[in-house]
Image (cartoon, grey):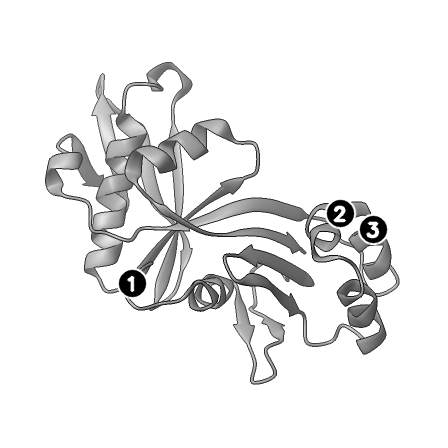
């Protein structure tokens, strides 16, 4: 796992990219970012729950009374419990990974820094690029895109490796996540040797 961080450390560190975690372990929204109402994470040691600071105790108790796998996968049930408190407009269900190593420059010979992104240039234009979608002083979350006609050529792997090398060398944790069922992103992660630390569902 990344450095000496445990899976619970990584879950909290990733959570803090978009939320403030207060002294009670509850979430406080950060201005301009999605407000997470409830999040559940399955990790190697069990489950971790986060609630927004103003979720009522009775609502928390109803969710905590569910079997953890139901809380993780039965989104309609959780949304129904949360409905009297707030309407969930977005549910992210995905796998979370981190880079446990620093990619070598040999892994991204064609990637260059261009307008804040690591890109592959072809035919006089950027065709694949990786950048920090969101981050803070301790961690950064990856975003990556490749033009459809240039996919399956290893470009995404190069730009992500370049991005991760920069992030990890800066002393931060490099996070990579994707929605469950995104087989292309999952294959990209495997090719990069990232380490999965959690399956997460975030209601916002």
Label 1 residue SS: loop
Q: Is residue 165 above or below residue 18?
A: above
At x 12%, y 32%, the residue is: 109
- Does the CB distance between marks 1 and 3 fall below 8 Å? no
On residue 75, the disc is 2
Q: Would residue 175 be found to the left or right of residue 161 on screen?
A: right
Question: Badge 1: how crowded within 10 Å, few (<14), some, or many (20+)?
Answer: some
| Mark 2–mark 1 distance (CA, rounded to whole Å) | 32 Å
Res. 34 in view: no
| Mark 3–mark 2 distance (CA, rounded to whole Å) | 5 Å
Res. 120 in view: yes
Is tag 1's residue or tag 3's residue first in the polypeptide sequence?
A: 3
Q: Would residue 152 be found to the left or right of residue 162 on screen?
A: right
Q: Which residue is mark 3?
A: 77
Question: Badge 2: how crowded within 10 Å, few (<14), some, or many (20+)?
Answer: some
Q: Which residue is mark 1?
A: 172
Residue 82, x across and y down, in percent: 81, 60
165 or 62: which is nearer to us?
62
117 or 40: which is nearer to us?
40
Q: Would residue 16 be found to the left or right of residue 101 on screen?
A: right
Q: Would residue 93 be found to the left or right of residue 167 on screen?
A: right
């Amino acid at each position: 796992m990344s450095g000496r961080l445990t899976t619970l450390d990584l879950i909290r560190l990733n959570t803090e990219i978009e939320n403030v975690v207060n002294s009670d372990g509850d979430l406080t929204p950060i201005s301009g970012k999605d407000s997470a109402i409830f999040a559940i994470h399955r990790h190697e040691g069990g489950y971790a729950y986060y609630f927004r600071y103003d979720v009522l105790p009775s609502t928390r108790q109803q969710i905590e009374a569910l079997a953890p796998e139901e809380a993780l996968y039965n989104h309609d049930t959780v949304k129904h419990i949360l409905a009297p408190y707030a309407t969930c407009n977005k549910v992210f269900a995905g796998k979370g990974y981190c880079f446990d190593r620093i990619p070598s420059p040999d892994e991204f010979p064609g990637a260059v820094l261009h307008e804040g992104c690591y890109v592959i240039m072809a035919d006089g234009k950027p065709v694949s690029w990786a950048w920090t979608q969101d981050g803070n002083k301790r961690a950064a979350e990856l975003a990556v895109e490749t033009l459809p006609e240039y996919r399956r050529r290893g470009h995404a792997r190069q730009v992500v490796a370049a991005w991760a090398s920069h992030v990890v060398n800066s002393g931060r944790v490099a996070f990579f996540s994707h929605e469950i069922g995104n087989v292309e992103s999952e294959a990209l992660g495997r090719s990069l040797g990232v380490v999965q630390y959690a399956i997460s569902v975030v209601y916002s």
